Image (cartoon, rainbow, N blue to C red):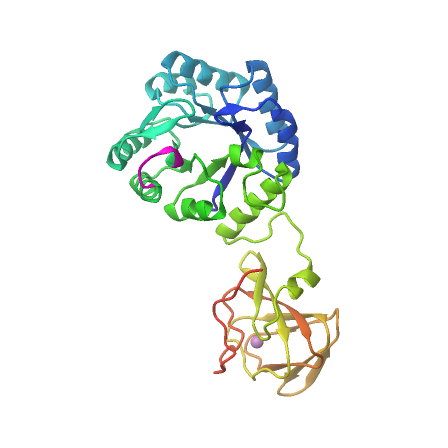
Amino acid sequence: MGLRFIFMLTRNDKTVEDAEQHLKTALAAGVHHIGFKDVGLPFDRLRELNAAIKAGGATSYLEVVTLDKGSEVASAKAAVEIGVDILLGGTNVNAVLPVLAGKGIQYYPFPGRIEGHPSVLAGSIDEIVDSAVELAAREGVHGLDLLAYRSAENVTGLMAAVCTAVDKPVIMAGSIGSRERIARVRRSGAAGFTIGTAALEGNYPADSPELEAQLRSIQRDVAGVNNHLSPNTTKNLDKAFASFSETWSPHIAGQVNNMAIKLAKFEGSFVWHHHEVEDELFLVHKGRLLMKFRDRDEIVEQGEFIVVPHGVEHCPVALTDPCEVVLLEPLATVNTGNAVDDRRVTELPYI
Ligand code: NI
């Protein structure tokens, strides 16, 4: 399962004043998991916010950052009353579980010792793992909310240790503000992560600090980390082909289930080969292609495609320079098939 991105309508651990407006932007950008915190806005507005998240088809999250038991129980009751899908955070599990019993809300408390506001995660990795194991064993606990990037410990080691020790989903929270950190979260085995402040302040690497650009950039990075490309954005073939010059070197431009969309520039003649099990589609985007078969030749004009069935020997030849071709074939298909040729490529770059 892919890594889940939860957009928090929060800055510095508080739900932001203009949450409703940001919610509209997030829904329009195709974000499907949206949360807020129990601090920052009055109860009535949180209720409306939650209703708007659900009306937009997204899953709602309330993260509890108040630390005293009374406030935490009040927040859990509020979560029940306004009907959030998932309750994140909090540490008073014994007090909260009875509130949630039978209410159909998933519960992901904080493992470890939480201090201060904005919250930090105190203690050693071993202590946090012990707490995580103990919590995850509880009935009514569906997962954990790990404040990984609010720990002074080695964050990568901490995330991996917790994810290895428990068999319930773990959401990572804290300062996840780059693709590299998202990739690290993914490698740790986490189920998801939250970003709030970085996107709302325009600090995530993107074309612009505007929230929409921030969210699209995060989603693109999540898709890349999940090995699923271009989920929500269009891809322009002219621009994509202009972004590389190597010939006979397919670039991956997208994926449709287990089929890859590969872009390649052909020049001159390739090598005779076949593929044991994979069919290949060649769609000419620019130029003319000659597809040689042992019994005949086919010319593929710009805007036309040809499918070469598996097992059939073929040899593509560019009749123009360049000849830009869109290939549709399994990700693992090697360009040279069964042939031995130094143009064989196995590690394809992504565009
Ligand atoms: Ni081939």
Image position of 310 (left or right of 157)? right
Image position of 348 (left or right of 125)? right
Q: From the top left corner, tell me how far across and down residue 197 is, in percent.
A: 52, 32
**Which residue is located at x 41 percent, y 47 percent?**
184
**Which residue is located at x 39 percent, y 23 percent?**
90
Front position in the image: 241 or 153 = 153
Does the magenta run of residues contain 7? no
Does the magenta run of residues contain 150? yes
Query: Which quadrant is the C terminus positioned in?
Result: bottom right
Image position of 184 (left or right of 311)? left
Quarter of the rendering containing residue 34: top right
Q: From the top left corner, tell me how far across and down residue 58 is, in percent.
A: 58, 33
Above or below, 163 relative to 113: below
The span picked out in magenta is 149-154
Quarter of the rendering containing residue 253: bottom right
- Give ligand 1's quarter of the image: bottom right
Residue 196 at least partly seen: no
Instruction: Report the magenta stretch's main SS.
Output: loop
